[in-house]
Amino acid sequence: GAILIDENEVVHKIDALKGRPINTVGAGDSMLAGFVAGYLDKKDYDYALKLGCACGTATAFSLNLATYQEIMNIFNKL
């Protein structure tokens, strides 16, 4: 899960998805990339945080960097 406190001191939170990590290499980078992509796309912190968590989680739950489909499967469960 993750917590973001924005410039207006609003707290944005998303819970972690339960599961067993397979390989966490690149999970943090994937989370950051997903957050930035989500924010640039929608200008919405909640959406960006959800997409970031989906990207990081999908990567941690796979052997390699996550695919788009793996990310969307996780995104829809968060």
Image: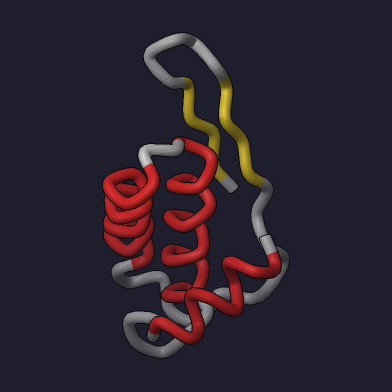
- Rendered residue at 43%/47% (across/down): 48
Query: Which residue is at the far top?
Result: 8
Where residue 41 sits in the image (x, y, percent)? 32, 52
Quick check: 58 left or right of 12? left
Quadrant of the image containing the C terminus: bottom right
- Rendered residue at 32%/64% (across/down): 30
Query: Which residue is at the far front?
Result: 42
How is the structure coloured here?
Answer: secondary structure
Where residue 31 sits in the image (x, y, percent)? 37, 57
Relative height, residue 69 to residue 43 (above, below): below
The picture quadrant where one finds residue 73 is: bottom right
Where residue 43 sits in the image (x, y, percent)? 36, 38
Quick check: 29 left or right of 42? left
- Rendered residue at 48%/45% (across/down): 49
Across the whole image, how many numbered discs are drawn on residues? Answer: 0
Quick check: 41 left or right of 60? left
The picture quadrant where one finds residue 10 is: top right
Relative height, residue 63 to residue 11 (above, below): below
- Rendered residue at 72%/66% (across/down): 18
The residue closer to the viewer here, 20 or 74, is: 74
Quick check: 5 left or right of 18? left
